[in-house]
């Protein structure tokens, strides 16, 4: 069975995979840089694909927390602002384009632990 670069149509190289696994960039930024989808980046980082290549494989599940997660809608700075803001949850949700329940979870520490 052919692996990695040997497969017809492969868009990534072993060097790309090692770069992806060692990078601090967001999933979205990596997907744009390498011309693949965000789920492909997630599969590479978690080791679900390119298993024969070493490198830093993140734990199963979300893998990367906070703003480095390719699907994150908020930055670490925005999280800090939400925690100290005197505004009501709905006002913050409208301001940042997220749900009121996410604002509640951020403030309680259930998301982005303090």
Image: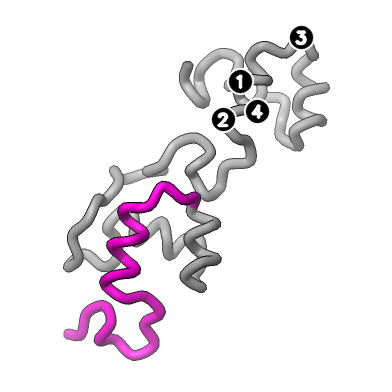
Tag in front: 2 or 3: 2
As drawn, is 103 to the left or to the right of 68?
Answer: right
**Residues at discs 2 and 1 in contact (Cβ within 8 Å):** yes
Marks 3 and 1, the one that precedes in the sequence: 1
> Distance of mark 2 from mark 3, alpha carbons?
18 Å
Image height of 38 relative to 97, above or below: below
Alpha-carbon neighbours of circle 1 within 10 Å: few (<14), some, or many (≥20)?
some
Gap in Å between the C-alphas at discs 3 and 1? Answer: 12 Å
Helix, strand or loop for disc 1? helix
CA gap between label 3 and label 4 equals 14 Å
Residue on which disc 3 sits:
86
**Nearer to us in this view, 25 or 103:** 25
In front of the other: 23 or 59:
23
The residue where tag 1 is placed is 80
| Mark 3 or 4, nearer chain start | 4
Tell me, yes or no, whether the highlighted magenta stretch contains residue 80.
no
User: For mark 2, does the 10 Å Cα neighbourhood hold few (<14), some (14 to 19), or many (20 or more) residues?
Assistant: few
Callout 1–callout 4 Cβ contact below 8 Å: yes
From the top left corner, tell me how far across and down residue 49 is, in percent: 29, 65
Marks 2/4 in contact by CB < 8 Å: the verdict is: yes
């Amino acid at each position: 069975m052919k692996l990695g670069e040997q497969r017809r149509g492969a868009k990534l190289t072993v060097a790309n995979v090692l770069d992806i696994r060692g990078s601090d960039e967001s999933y979205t930024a990596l997907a744009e840089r390498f011309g693949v989808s965000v789920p492909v980046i997630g599969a590479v980082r978690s080791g679900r694909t390119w298993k024969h290549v070493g490198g830093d494989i993140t734990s199963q599940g979300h893998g990367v927390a906070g703003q480095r997660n390719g699907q994150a809608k908020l930055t670490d700075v925005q999280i800090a602002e939400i925690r100290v803001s005197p505004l009501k949850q709905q006002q913050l949700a409208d301001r940042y384009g997220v749900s009121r329940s996410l604002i509640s979870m951020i403030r309680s520490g259930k998301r982005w632990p303090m």
